[in-house]
Amino acid sequence: MKFHSTRGEARAASLSEAIAAGLATDGGLYVPDHMPQLDVDEFAAAATLPVIAARLLAPFFATDALSSQLDAICTDAFTFPAPLRALATPHDHVLELFHGPTAAFKDFGARFLAACMRRLPRDTSKPLTILVATSGDTGAAVGAAFSGVPGFRVVILYPDGRVAPRQAHQLGCFGGNVTALRVAGSFDECQSMVKQAFADAELRARVPLSSANSISLGRLLPQMAYYAHSALAHRHGGGSPLNFVVPTGNLGNAVAGILARACGLPIGRIVLATNANRVLPDFFGGADYAPQASVATIANAMDVGAPSNFERLRWLYPDSTRLRGEFRAFSVSDAWIRATISDRCARYGEVFCPHTATAVHVLERLRTDGEPGDWTAVATAHPAKFGSVIEPLIARQIVVPAALAALLSRPANAEPLPATYPALRSRLLAD
């Protein structure tokens, strides 16, 4: 299979080329030249997540140099579970994606990308710099996936003061070949700086670059697997097609679920949940797509005013009327996020991170409006990462998972950086 740019001006690339490049030369995002159609009956009822991932991704890897190693890549990447758990309310579930080394769903894609990148041939005379902008969780997942891997360095940009304290500690705790830069600006400014670096041919000639943001095909494709795994398990258990409420910022996680459905997996409706950043709810409500300056919220990983993966959504649904007919998006205020966290804990003993609580609140709204069917809220991070927000609301401490506790026990350091591209360029050239 070949992959082309959403903007249509770059040459077609193999999967390996697309993963290595991160961003297409015309600034667009790589997408497959077609969506394969899979027979769900070929997926065994008891198949594990790595096995389902390899079966699901095989058509995308077909004819590529990495195809013979896909099973090993999936085995390396998917070493922790993604359980689908029932909530206290009937027919409602939560898909827990936070059981990896950094306690966030980003671990799946980051580890898969690292497993691919380690196997790709490349010039080893210079280290390959993995450049990543993060609104909270991506950077730590990428840092963990590439930490200590020879021939790679990771440079993480995050908005100073706009991530949770434990997220900030994670971002700066790796050291060695992982550098954290705390930028005096927003996530959108961090993302813009990264995109400028990829468009800078002179810089890339001196500093080989690749991406690990959700713009990366190597991160996007593996995220399809946990949607497939949960939907297939639900189907084999006799349930109706599983519907999802996905908390979203840069749209990568939601697009992964949408791609899995487009391949024929038994996935029902997909609803987007955002915080106070209303770009997507406004668009799906009928307004023109209009990126805005991001607003800081307690669900900080979704503080995105210009979601990059909207380009991929447009590629899948070029007609705006059809796109709006396929999906809905809801905005949830900080006040409602806090109320959901407090209420679900008091009534049911359920504890959610702010991002997951956003999805749970939207699910509650759907049920109030009479929405039928089996639904799951996608739980993107462990609540312990946001103890400073959640613990005052539930009046108790949250047990920190062992893997997260290990990272928090390390010393952490992040360098300050102005929110300008020249500052980033100089820093990349300094090493």
Image (spheres, rainbow, N blue to C red):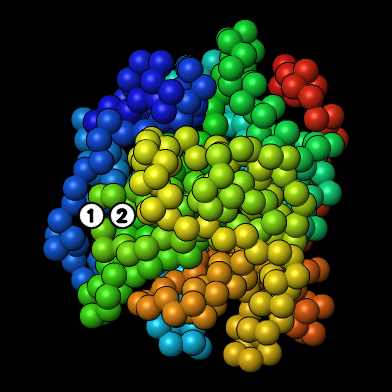
Circle 2 sits on which residue?
261
Q: Which quadrant holds the N terminus?
A: top left
Q: Residue at x 27, y 75 (%)?
A: 240
Which residue is painted at 37% across and 38% down in the image?
319
The C terminus appears in which quarter of the rendering? Answer: top right
- Whether residues under marks 2 and 1 lie with C-beta atoms below 8 angstroms apart, the answer is yes
Residue type, numbered disc 2: Arg
Q: Quadrant of residue 321?
A: top left
Q: Where in the figure is residue 258, as x and y percent of width and height? A: 37, 51
Looking at the picture, how far across and down is residue 302, in whole percent? 64, 52
Say what amino acid the circle numbered 1 marks: Gly
Residue 90 placement, left or right of 53: right
Label 1 SS = loop
Under circle 2, the secondary element is helix
For the residue pair 114 and 34, the one nearer the viewer reads as 34
Above or below for 177 versus 359: above
Which mark, by number, is residue 264?
1
Q: Residues within 10 Å of mark 1 (few under 14, many from 20)?
A: some
Q: Residue 20: x and y, percent?
A: 45, 27
48, 93: nearer the viewer: 93
User: Which sits in the foreground, 33 or 411?
Assistant: 33
In percent of the image, x 46 and y 30: which residue is there? 29
Q: Is residue 42 left or right of residue 212?
A: left
